[in-house]
Amino acid sequence: MATNEQRREAAKRKLAAQQAHRVERARKQKRNTTIAVVATVLVVAVAAGGVYALTAAWGGGDTEPADPAAQAQQDTGPDTSGLPIVPLPTRPTALPGSVNCAYPTEAPASKPVDPPADGEVSAEGTVPASFSTSAGTIDLTLDRALAPCTVHSFESLIQQGYYNGTSCHRLTTSPGLQVLQCGDPTGQGAGGPGYTIPDEVFDGLSYGRGMLAMAKTAAPNSGGSQFFMIYGDAQLPPEYTVFGSIGEEGLRTLDAVARAGESVGSGDGTPNMPVDIETATVG
């Protein structure tokens, strides 16, 4: 029987291969000036959000999405409603009361937005946040003590309306990776805010149901706006910043989305039940 470490490494290799294939396909699509909607990269891992990476997130399936209504009648996802919520991890050594954060700019933003100011940010306390979506409310609690720079960026993006009118582009349903990935205004898994945020990971970091984490690419400190919400299992290497938790109402919404399945039928595609973020609030 494979160990947890072996499963994590296998998941990482699979996601990296998927992401590489996704990037190559996107390059060919751009070259041919073809406009298509594809499964986004999640992120949990590489992602560009991690992508896998869970990109801004993980790599995704290679088959184009089927008609959601027809697919929903054929495929059903896992029922994760009875799974226990995994407590948030804690840092082996607590951060000081404030930390210095920097948000270097890179590629153009996928949607107009200003990066948060560099400098000292609080590493204490929690912040409530909420997404009003077409599938239901997703309530969150952001934890500054876990990832102050990430929380500061996430708050800034919400306050500027960056997530309003965007869709969660990727749902993974296979054991070992059960997440919903969101945060790319283009809906294709490679978009971001035009700046990057630092990784805020630590030894012993693990993942489970109820956690909110950042997607990224394979490169360090490459997170942006894409994030993933873990509604079930997630056997991942400790490379993705956990910066908050999902509330009971939010998990009920995610469980319903998971049960409806994903478009490709391989365990990695766009959700059959659309998750369109109508408004996001924080504080």
Image (cartoon, rainbow, N blue to C red):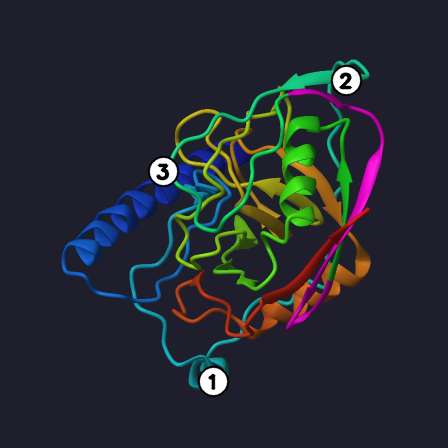
Residue 183 appears in the picture as rendered: yes
Where does label 3 land, which residue?
A: 13
Q: Position of residue 164 (x, y in %)?
A: 61, 60
Q: Is residue 254 magenta?
A: no
- Can you tell which mark lies on residue 69? 1
The span from disc 3 to disc 1 (Cα, nearest Å) is 32 Å
Q: Are marks 3 and 1 in contact (CB under 8 Å)?
A: no
Q: Are marks 1 and 2 in contact (CB under 8 Å)?
A: no
70, above or below 126, in the image: below
Work out whether residue 277 or residue 119 is closer to the camera in this orientation and state it: 119
Local SS, label 1:
helix
The span from disc 2 to disc 3 (Cα, nearest Å) is 36 Å
> In percent of the image, x 45 and y 38: which residue is there?
194
Q: Position of residue 60 (x, y in %)?
A: 38, 54
Which of pointers 2 and 3 lies earlier in the amino acid sequence?
A: 3
> In percent of the image, x 37 and y 37: which residue is there?
107
- Can you tell which mark lies on residue 98? 2
Work out whether residue 158 or residue 5 is closer to the camera in this orientation and state it: 158
Q: Characterize the magenta stretch by its predominant secondary structure.
A: strand
Q: Residue furthest left?
A: 32
Residue stretch rendered in magenta on the structure? 119-137
**Residue type at the position of mark 3:** Arg
Q: Is residue 232 left or right of residue 9?
A: right
- Front position among marks 1 and 2: 2
85, above or below 200, in the image: below
The span from disc 1 to disc 2 (Cα, nearest Å) is 49 Å
> In percent of the image, x 28 and y 43: which residue is there?
20
- Can you tell which mark lies on residue 226? none
Q: Is residue 129 magenta?
A: yes
